Image (spheres, rainbow, N blue to C red):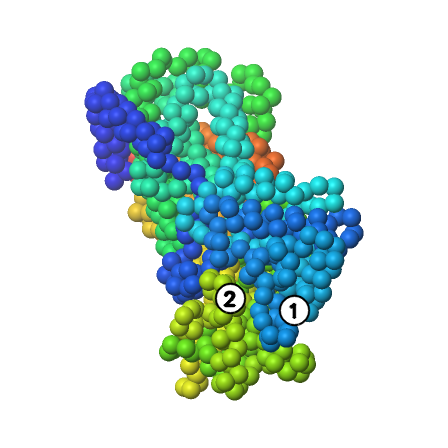
Amino acid sequence: MQERENQFWYRFVEKQLKYRYWILGIMTILTLVFAANVFFKLKVVTNFFDLYPPKHQYIQLYKEFRKMFGSANVLTIILERTDGKEIYHPDTLEKLDTLTRGILETSGVNPLQVASAVHPKVKQVVTGSAGIGIFPLTHPSAGYPKTEEEAQAFRKRVYSNAGVRGFYIALDDKSAVVYAGLWEEGLDFAYLFKAINELTAKVEDGKHVCYVSGYPMLYAWMDYYKTQLLIVLLITITAIVITLAFYFRSVRGVLIPLVSGVVSAIWGLGFAGMAGFNIDPLLLVVPILLSARALSHSCQCMDRYHQEFAVLLDKRKAIIVAYSEVFAPCMAGAITDGLGCLTIAFASIPLMQKLAFISSFWVISILVAVTLLNPIIIYFLPTPNIQDKVKVRSWLGKRKVSTWSLAYQKTMEFLVKLSGPRMKWGVLTIVLLLALPGAYTATHLKIGDSSAGGAILYADHPYNVAAAKINEKFVGGSRLVVVVKGKEKGAIKDAHTLQVMDQLGNYMKNNIPNVGGTMSLTDLVRGIYRLFHDGSPKWEIVPTNKQHLGGIYFMLASNMAPGEMDQFVSLPDYTHSNVTAFFRNYNASTIKSAIAETKEFAERVNSDPDSKVEIKLAGGILGILAAVNEEVEWSYWAIFIIIFSTVFVICLITYRSIKAALILIIPVFVAQVLCDLFMMLNHIDLNIDSLPVASVGVGVGIDYGIYLMSRLREECGKTNDFEKAKLIALTTTGKTIMFTALTIAVALIPWLFSSLKFQAEMGILILFLMIFNMIGALVFVPALSAVLKPNFVKNMAIRKSDSKEVAMAGARRRKCHID
């Protein structure tokens, strides 16, 4: 069977060389087409809707009500006095007014979601000779307070009206905040970053400083670092070129892998541009993994060509023999990689689906570049110089070796011993012990971001400092919005509905950790009703009398400008409303617990047949993150089950042996367990950015294992001696595996110094995967092959037995003849 396969690939490579000009012409045209799409259509930018799982009930609820209650992506600008004084001075309030007006003029901002203590939207309820009235907090001054007297009067109004301190003015009175909601569509992060920095620069001086946080600013920072990331990519490519030159010491050795990587990259990125997909800046680390595949496949083929040329001394024959031998493992590795990447599409998050399609096409383009293009390029290049360029002689010979060769010799001797008769059982034990933590890591790996910027930026980054400020000085910067959806028009005017909303706000403040405060329509209703009773605190309740409620609603409607009530209730029908909880801090478990607690309250209301409303979860940024976290948790299990099943089936088809498939899959599984453990120990969150990196990384290990397994099977058939076959496989294919893994490891060093914490962590994670997958291929595959004895090892033993019987029969015949 194997011989028939080799004959097929032998004829296939012959045809490639025969029609080399046609193939080269077609690939050139395709590459130019893809390059045009990269240049004209590809965008490296974040699209917020790519981060949301569209079918999740929380996202559907958010989309239904976001135009009614506003966007979940809220930008916050804190203005803080640094001289120890309170903000109630004209110079500070003027700066707060400048920030408020400036953010209103910023493109992409929803003007109805801009609010600050000096914005007319923030109200005070006052009593006078004309009765009770609702006015802007800055009333009666025109605009912000312009004198010290007006500033102190403003201070009194802040203290006498609930819902101002903690929400718009810091609890220590030394800073104030401006909120601005931004729509997801068409948000220009480069413009936003520049506009916000120019705006804050206008108000900052020796006594005032600004802090900016919120998801829009987080992604604006990532866009800002985009150029730096591209520079790091160029440094990475340069490092790969240098290591290729060091290893092969020839133009051919650098050119062939580089062409493979560049062509596959153009095809992959061109496909993204052609399909209208954008590339998220955070996922620029994925090309490193895909480049590792191109480098691995290309170097394996190049090394095999050099080895065959040293024996045949004929370039054409060496190309045909070399590529006919590596075609099958190269195709198996590429198909495994491609399907493995494609499984990421099972997640319903558009960002991950797009990445899945781009990565799988990219991997297939690697197969095309390596197996179709490389042999033709080699054919046109000069013949290798055996003495200088080809290093295929065994290090067991008597020739003088360099320090590098001597180190490699000692390494190979150690690797051979590890899978030898004495140590193979010890290696198997180690494999099993390393696999044991799998059940623990799979159930304890942290799902979701630890904070808005904690998973992406370092703790001392200005963004995280700003996020810490709003959580420390105010009621909290992250919002969970609970929608109160009416079953009929006017449902929110019902006294029972308002009482339910009030109870929900109190329930969330008292039962959910990290909730600094809540905001809803009932805050206004209670404040007005209190003034109906001379400001007595005991009357700060939701009235049950319909006439009282009617009066309050009339007052609200007549004293509010258009759009000012939108954050609280749907107008003019009063059908829907919301309760917003502000969180000082959060993580995945906090969000999950908050959702569970709120659902418990909602079930009681929703099960009441007399209720005129339904409690629906969940909006706000925490509702979106809850949906994303649930999808990531589900996707983690689904993706890895499908990936490992796919890899196992393809290996089974390739080698026609369950044992061979197990030998390949076990080291990859152990690598994944150690990857999860590494993430846990280093507090790396499993989120929509890190999950694809970890998923794509699975294929790297299987590539290494497939190549070593294929060479081991080939040499077992040729030598009929497992130890000798293992030695040849490790000193040829194993050497290339070691080189490609270390090359990527060296190339990842610049990522460790990235300004983005996420990129540095992913660099370390990929580095870890590279090294362990290399160890898995060079140590575990030979050792497990020696223990489990797949079909090619068993067949070798059968051939030995048959040869021995033939020899014994011949000896008996000779003996009879002599007798």
Residue 700: x and y, percent? Answer: 44, 41
* For discs 1 and 2, the disc positioned in front in the rendered view: 2
Residue placed most toward the observer, 78 or 631: 78
| Quarter occupied by the C terminus | top left
Position above or below: 547 against 157: below
What residue sits 51% from the left and 43% below the top? 192
Mark 1, residue position = 161
Rendered view: 336 above or below 733: below
Question: Where's residue 681, x and y in %?
Answer: 62, 52
Separation (CA) of disc 1 from disc 2: 16 Å
Q: Is residue 252 left or right of residue 741?
A: left
Could you tell whether 680 is left or right of 335 in the image? Answer: right
Amino acid on which the number 2 mark rests in the picture: Met
Residue appearing at x 45%, y 52% in the figure: 183
Q: Nearer the viewer, residue 643 or 798?
A: 643
Instruction: Identify the residue position indicated by label 2 in the image.
Output: 560
Give the camera-side residue of 230 and 744: 230
Instruction: Tell me residue 479's x, y (percent).
Output: 55, 62
Secondary structure found at label 1:
loop
- 663 left or right of 16 in image: right
Going from N to C along the chain, the mark reached first, 1 or 2, is 1
Counting the numbered discs, the total is 2
User: Helix or strand or loop: what does disc 2 sit on?
Assistant: loop
Q: What residue do we see at 46% from left, 42% from top?
A: 188
Residue 800 visible to an observer of this rendering: no
Residue toward you, 490 or 651: 490
